[in-house]
Image (cartoon, rainbow, N blue to C red):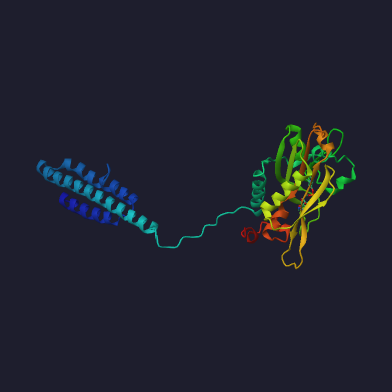
Amino acid sequence: MPVENTLEQLRSTSLQELEECTSKLELEEWRVKYLGRKGHVTGLLRKLKNLEPLEKKIFGSQANQLKGFLEERLVLAEGKLMAEETLAIGENDRIDVTRPGRLINVGGYHPLTKIRREIEEAFISMGFQVVEGPEIEWDHYNFELLNIPKNHPSRDIWDTLWVDYRNERGERNMLLRTHTSPMQARIMEQEEPPIRVIVPGKVYRYEATDRTHEWHFHQVEGLAVDKGITFADMKGTLYEFARKVFGSERKVRFRCDYFPFVEPGVDMSIDYLAPGATTHDWLEIMGAGMVHPKVLEGVGYDPEEYTGFAFGIGLERIAMLKYGIDDIRLFFDNDLRFLRQF
Ligand code: FA5
């Protein structure tokens, strides 16, 4: 085929194919096919060396022009493709600022966390510090240092979950703490008076559950030890706590109670109208009392020099009273319909 025809044909077929390219990959394949080292245009230029000098000159220049022309068209085609891609991205990602936003589910605090913080605030404002202690405890701290010797009937007050472990004497002496009171002994062992601390934490009991009893729940222990602390200090502190958390109108009741580690011992209840009930009742929220001299001696304090008071508040009970919740088990069901109310 004469060279001019070949040039013309190359021009029209290559341009047509260039038109049909719709991606960068196709454009690159097109470039290799026509302008690459083994491409049609380059091949044609190589063949020119067999022509007569004049023909070589004419067609050489035409072939070079075609090469330059196709290179330009390739750049244009690449530019067009890029513009189309940019436009497509804009179409897909366009932001409609007038559309109403989607509601985001923000997590909230568990009601018990809220109450714990509120109780902490109340005591911090009265000069107490917050400390924490272990949930797995030794019999020594949970019972013995609290004036509850082995085989003493008062142990029955706390139905205990024992850890499957025995010491070298074969005794089972590790347990899930039944109350936060073991921290009384741990703190006094390490610190010198004056002491004023509260200890929030989880406790466990081998107990049947009902509306007001759980087998795992939270307490906030309190301990104040110094020279000259009296029962009146304890009453004043606990009334102030009740006033801060429940308001000054709420009725509070103290009654005598027995705990081996205090003398005298009391419990405190709050006036309670259960949801749906018509008559008021009392809900016990804490045990308290003056630290027993034997407990002070056990940790190396002189009971003639120091006195103190201690208390253990049931956190779930406070939350039930504050939020009008009539079943303690709701706190641990993880039902979002319940948790979202707070
Ligand atoms: C004690 O646990 C003592 N350690 C409290 C104490 C501390 C007395 C310091 C004296 C000095 P008690 O078993 O009564 O006491 O529990 C204290 C509070 O925890 C109760 O008043 C109640 O509010 C809460 N409570 C007790 N048992 C349960 C239970 N099964 N479920 C939910 N709350 C409970």
Residue 163 visible in rendering: no
- Residue plotted at (25% across, 56% down): 16
Q: Nearer the viewer, residue 200 or 175?
A: 200
In this picture, residue 70 sits left or right of residue 299: left
Q: How many marks?
A: 0
Q: Position of residue 185 (x, y in %)?
A: 77, 37
In the displayed structure, would residue 41 be above or below residue 276? Answer: above
Q: Position of residue 108 (x, y in %)?
A: 59, 54
In this picture, residue 54 sits left or right of residue 103: left
Asked where in the image residue 56 lies, by quadrant, the reply is top left
In the displayed structure, would residue 246 be above or below residue 148? Answer: below
Q: Position of residue 242 (x, y in %)?
A: 70, 52
Quadrant assignment for the C terminus: bottom right
- Residue plotted at (75% across, 39% down): 183
In this picture, residue 332 sits left or right of residue 291: left
Residue 136 visible in rendering: yes
